[in-house]
Amino acid sequence: MNEIEALHGRDSELLSEVVAAIDADTRRLRELVPCMLDMSAREATLSSRYGHTLQDKIELYRLAREFGFDDFLLPNFFDFPSVADRFLEFVVEQDLAREQFLVTLAVEPTAEGAPLAEHPAIHRLHEARIPNLILLVEIRPSTLARAGRTRGEALADIERYIRHFRQALPAEDERRGRIYVRVADVYDAFDEDPEFTAQVFRLLGESPTTGILFEDVRGSRFVFETRQLVRLMRHFNPPPRKLLVHPHSGNGMEDAATIEAVVAGADGVWAGFTPQAAQGGHGSAMMFLTNLLRAGNRHVAERFDLEKLTRIAAAMWRIHDHQDVPDTQPVVGERAYRYVDEYFEQSDLPGDLDPRLIGRAPGYQVSPAWAPTYVIGKRLAELGYGPEITGDRELLNAMRRLMNRSQLEGRHVVFDEPDELVKLLQRAQQFLASPDAAAAAPPGDSSVLTLRYR
């Protein structure tokens, strides 16, 4: 056997660069103090076939508070009565601390010196004394053209609204007087006119704002687009300005996009706790925070009540969809920590999420077409069987053989169910006591690497 060749100079340099880059990105996730604006009572109502009643809104707010969120986006206000109005009345009647809430209103075209356009959200803001604001702006040049606005006029509109509310709101501190600017169409604007988009970022960086909220509205963008846009925003808006991301689902990148944004310099997300959102879903706070946990972020555990994560997610799921969490849902689904092979177990290896951190107990699931003897033994141990059964490789292998026989015969049996597993165990014991057992004996354990498949 030949000796392994030593790496050449450039090989070693590349290896060092890769290791350093991974370490730097992981350190960023590990050390981040996440900035979170909760939209649990707002975001999922867009897609829920049931909508949200006032009691739904109140319960979602209370659940989010119980988990540890302390900033909440109020629902949209219209020029007709809505549940959003009733929820704001609840806030006032209960005399809830106003600094935990933010109102969103759109930047409308106005002339210098003229009053701002009448908007229901402005009235609600003043009537309820909400001290924080999100200004929704649209900067896509084709959208501006349809509205009869030039790029320069659009920049003036943004500046005018910021100036007005900087005077109307309390002086800014950590909880009051915050003005976020939500750029709803940033990807499309960048496609049409990158230079103008950069001008908007520069204006926001030079204005008395708290930070930028942006989103991938259609869920059609790639994570590298998000990374580069965050780099550009951060260039003009250095810390302590906040940059918060909100990617929708559509191409499977929504949860990766939140991580990519943070690695590039963003501070967190403005999102609902669970994945339900506008179209099919979005990069949720639940997934974002648990991914930070995977990187070893201690701030998440210090700020949020993680042992309640699964219960709160399940309660929100029932409000949004009127059904339980799907079994296959990552992190909080029933199947998330039912391992079908020991090599799928998550505990303390890099990137693992120990389920006990979020109040879950890991377990094992016997799947008829696979089910290694290791998993069958673990599942039997969960049902109270001792080592004389769970450690009997010959018996466990016989159970595996019989499960596959049922598949060959075209039968679907859920062997993971306790009653079925007990019957399977008894059949395997009978099989081993029969003359057929010797003829069906497996080959000897001659290959260490193939043992994992038995």
Image (spheres, rainbow, N blue to C red):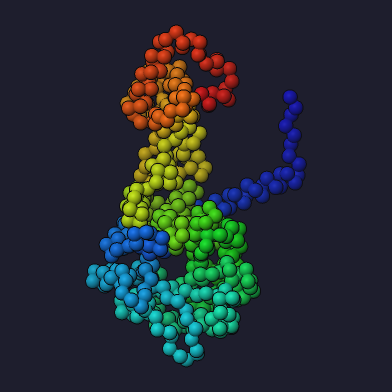
Query: What's the residue at 56%, 76% (across, down)?
Result: 143
- For the image, the number of numbered tags is 0
- Quarter of the image with the N terminus is top right
User: Residue 193 placed where, x, y %?
Assistant: 63, 73
Query: What's the residue at 52%, 56% (across, down)?
Result: 250
The quarter of the displayed image where residue 191 is located: bottom right
Q: Is residue 259 visible?
A: no
Q: Nearer the viewer, residue 152 or 427?
A: 427
Residue at the extreme front of the image, as rendered: 410
Q: Is residue 131 left or right of residue 153?
A: left
Query: Quick check: 52 above or below 142?
Result: above
Query: Quick check: 36 above or below 210?
Result: above
User: Residue 346 placed where, x, y %?
Assistant: 46, 39
Residue at the extreme bottom of the image, as rendered: 113
Query: What's the residue at 49%, 36% (across, down)?
Result: 344
User: Residue 433 placed where, x, y %?
Assistant: 40, 10
The quarter of the displayed image where residue 414 is located: top left
Query: Quick check: 426 above or below 83?
Result: above
User: Residue 93 placed where, x, y %?
Assistant: 23, 71
Q: Is residue 10 left or right of residue 189?
A: right
